[in-house]
Amino acid sequence: MLVKFRINLNKMVKANVLLGVIFVVQVMVGFPFNAKGLSMNYYIMNCPFAEQIVRNTVDSALQKDPTLAAGLVRMFFHDCFIEGCDASILLDSTKDNTAEKDSPANLSLRGYEIIDDAKEEIENQCPGVVSCSDIVAMAARDAVFWTGGPVYDMPMGRKDGRRSKIEDTRNLPSPFLNASQLIQTFGQRGFSVQDLVALSGAHTLGAARCSSFKPRLANTDSTMDSEFAKTLSRTCNAGDNAEQPFDDTRNDFDSLYFNALQRKSGVLFSDQTLYNSPRTRNIVNGYSFNQARFFFDFQQAMVKMSMLDVKDGSQGEIRQNCRRIN
């Protein structure tokens, strides 16, 4: 037991040194870490092993099923883009309310059990301290790193929201939006065009279901490579739930997603439109050529997203169970 503790302590020391470097870099680019009371070391005194618990839980789950990495990143995005990063995506529906997770846009989300497992272990050590929204943010970050993406940290201290309604999910970006519509949608949430393209790069992980790209086949989309169109058609032969990876390395975080767009092999219309539009094409080309730049911009955009509509004070709570309000 003592040996195990020393190993974990050594890992924590190394991690804290690394996070210190990341903190300096992020301060240099001007992130407001004190926004809404958020802090890089929020749990250092009252639950110092919280981040390690989440990381271990994520690592263990992804070793068994690497495809869950995409689910954790997508869960974070679908949570933050609606009511802000408040874990509203985790709440179960009740007899009086249909929650966000039961929206058609969210039915394919995966990874809830990972959040539940991390929360349960944290509650055993630090009851009533760590929010579910912070766990979602940590899990997405750890999934990116596990798949080979950039290492970065996020400020913590979010509270969990009490609202989760299916009608709010209409504000999620549709896979059928063009570049101008995406720019407008993301702009309304405070994101730049560069942020939009960088965040879209999360599609380097995972796959899309046929139902989300089938209309492109029916309309003979001219922006799509003819051979790739045949590939998508074969995928859809297996039904609307059949999956097509976004790029050739669905479980690796890299820049191949942008290479696919250059080849007119973007799976979703909202993917390919980023290369077709002159407002975003140069950014796509840049990320395709310079993966390091993509990684840097992606992590900045993820931190920015993590600060959307943060709940603090009486606006939120620390849920005991992530699936229901206290």
Image (cartoon, helix red, strand yellow):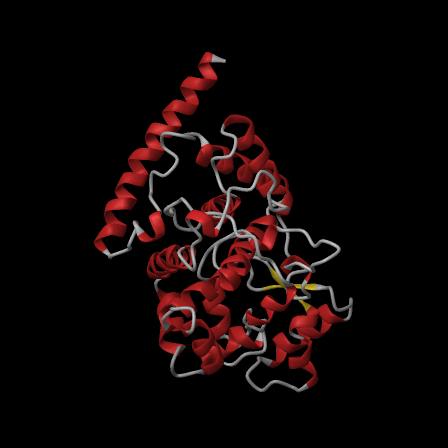
* Nearer to me, 248 or 143: 143
Rendering coords of residue 194 (x, y %): 36, 70
Number of marks present in the image shown: 0
Compared across the picture, whether 37 is left or right of 112 comes to left
Residue located at (60% from left, 71% from top): 170
Q: Check the image and report above or below for 64 versus 309.
A: above
Residue located at (65% from left, 71% from top): 212
Rendering coords of residue 215 (x, y %): 67, 80
Q: Quadrant of residue 269?
A: bottom right
Compared across the picture, whether 110 is left or right of 153 comes to right
* Nearer to me, 13 or 246: 13
Residue located at (58% from left, 78% from top): 176
Q: Check the image and report above or below for 320 versus 254.
A: above
The quadrant the C terminus occupies is top right
Rendering coords of residue 171 (x, y %): 55, 71
Q: Quadrant of residue 195?
A: bottom left
Q: Residue furthest right?
A: 238
Residue located at (24% from left, 51% from top): 27
Rendering coords of residue 226 (x, y %): 61, 81
